[in-house]
Image (cartoon, rainbow, N blue to C red):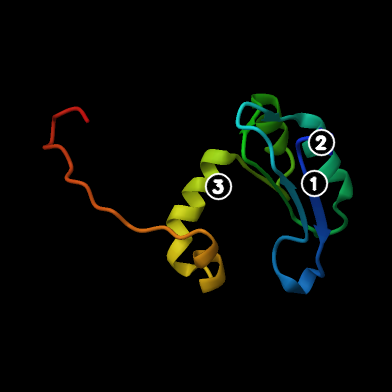
């Protein structure tokens, strides 16, 4: 998938009956790097009839890759910010071994009064 020396690639094909995502591309990149169209096209090329694809980057997604992915409804792209949002939204549902690996604690802060800037 066009990965450099400081990046890892995990592409895994799962039996269709195990869930909605059958091909997964995981990209571990520096935050400044972007997921680009050729990587999305390569994942698309690895999908076969009825499979879904998920490409995750800790960095960002180029606007061209985002536009291209909209033409391929079977592929979902998740950038670093989206990944953090998903983790925070679903953390309580994680298996205990994952919560132990990434221990988080909910903290409440007072909100500013309505109309005031944060």
Q: Select label 3 or label 1 by which is in front.
A: 1
Considering every residue shown, the one lying at the far left of the view is 113
Q: Are marks 3 and 1 in contact (CB under 8 Å)?
A: no
Disc 2 designates what residue? Answer: 3
Q: Residues within 10 Å of mark 2 (few under 14, many from 20)?
A: few
Q: Residue at x 50, y 54 (%)?
A: 87
Q: Residue at x 74, y 29 (%)?
A: 36
Q: Nearer the viewer, residue 22 or 106?
A: 106
Disc 3 designates what residue? Answer: 83
Q: Is residue 61 above or below residue 18?
A: above
Is tag 2's residue or tag 3's residue first in the polypeptide sequence? Answer: 2
In this rendering, position of residue 87 left or right of residue 108: right
State which quarter of the image contains the C terminus: top left
Q: Residues within 10 Å of mark 3 (few under 14, many from 20)?
A: some
Q: Nearer the viewer, residue 16 or 113?
A: 113
Disc 1 designates what residue? Answer: 9
SS for callout 2: loop
SS for callout 3: helix
Q: Residues within 10 Å of mark 1 (few under 14, many from 20)?
A: some
Q: Are marks 1 and 2 in contact (CB under 8 Å)?
A: yes
Number of numbered discs overlaid on the protein picture: 3
């Amino acid at each position: 998938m066009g990965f450099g020396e400081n990046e890892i690639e995990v592409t895994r094909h799962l039996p269709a009956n195990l869930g909605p995502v059958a091909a997964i591309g995981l990209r571990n990149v520096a935050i400044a790097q972007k997921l680009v169209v050729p990587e999305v096209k390569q994942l698309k090329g690895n999908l076969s009839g009825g499979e879904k694809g998920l490409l995750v980057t800790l960095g960002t997604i180029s606007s061209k890759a985002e536009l291209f992915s909209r033409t391929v409804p079977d592929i979902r792209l998740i950038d670093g910010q989206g990944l953090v949002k998903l983790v925070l939204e679903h953390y309580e549902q994680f298996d205990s071994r994952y919560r132990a690996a990434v221990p988080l604690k909910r903290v409440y802060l007072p909100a500013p009064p309505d109309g005031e800037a944060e």
